[in-house]
Amino acid sequence: MINLQQGDCIGLHRSTLVQSGVSTSDAVKRLAFCVLVGVSTGCASPAGSPQEQAPATPQSRSAGVNARSSGLAYAERACATCHAVNDDQLRSPDPNAPAFELIANTPGMTIMALNVWLHSPHKDMPLLRVEPDKLEDLSAYLYTLKERKAEPG
């Protein structure tokens, strides 16, 4: 069992994980811990916030669709060399790189967790600097894969 403390979120750096031989399950535990720290320190919107209460307008729905489309376009340019980024891809080009659908459907994966995951380096993955708007688009796209998977078939 891994003993986690608030400072362990810093331990998600790629070289630290590689050098220390952290297993995938321990890395996921660290990610979950960091998400919990973020929530407990007030990074999440409070329940009942105006953002949560406002019904989706055609404009906001359109913005969401655009974000997902932009996220897919970005993923195809920046991530598809290693990852299966489309929902119809069964395997990633790099067998060590998980498919986006698998990432999106990891238990407990929320928009916040996706953002933390996208900000965190991973074993065998280069440390990428992604512009904030592209990161939001990528998170929105990844989340659509979760929603699609969760719908009854």
Image (cartoon, rainbow, N blue to C red):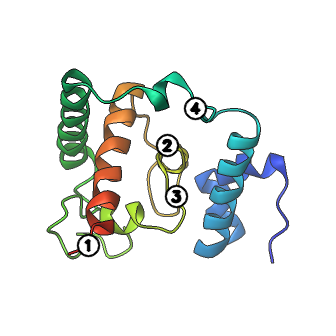
Element at label 2: helix
Q: Earlier in the sequence, mark 2 or mark 1?
A: 2
For the question of whether residue 115 can be seen, the reply is: yes
Mark 2: give few (<14), some (14-19) or many (20+) Cα within 10 Å.
Answer: some
Camera-nearest residue between 124 and 9: 9
**Badge number at residue 152:** 1
Mark 2 or 3, which is nearer the eye?
A: 2
Instruction: State which quadrant residue 92 falls in.
Output: bottom left
Q: CB of mark 4 within 8 Å of CB of mark 1?
A: no
Task: Point out the image quarter for the C terminus.
Answer: bottom left
Q: Residue at 48% across / 32% down in the picture? A: 52
Element at label 4: loop
Alpha-carbon span between mark 2 and mark 1 = 26 Å
As drawn, 136 above or below 37: above
Amino acid, disc 4: Gly
The residue to which callout 3 is attached is: 122
Q: CB of mark 3 within 8 Å of CB of mark 1?
A: no
Residue that lies at the very extreme toward the left in this rendered image: 88
Mark 2 or 1, which is nearer the eye?
A: 1
Q: Residue at 54% across / 50% down in the picture? A: 113
Q: CB of mark 2 within 8 Å of CB of mark 1?
A: no
Mark 4: give few (<14), some (14-19) or many (20+) Cα within 10 Å.
Answer: few
The residue to which callout 2 is attached is: 115
Instruction: State which quadrant residue 149 falls in.
Output: bottom left
Amino acid, disc 1: Pro
Horizontal side of 24 relative to 91 (left or right) equals: right
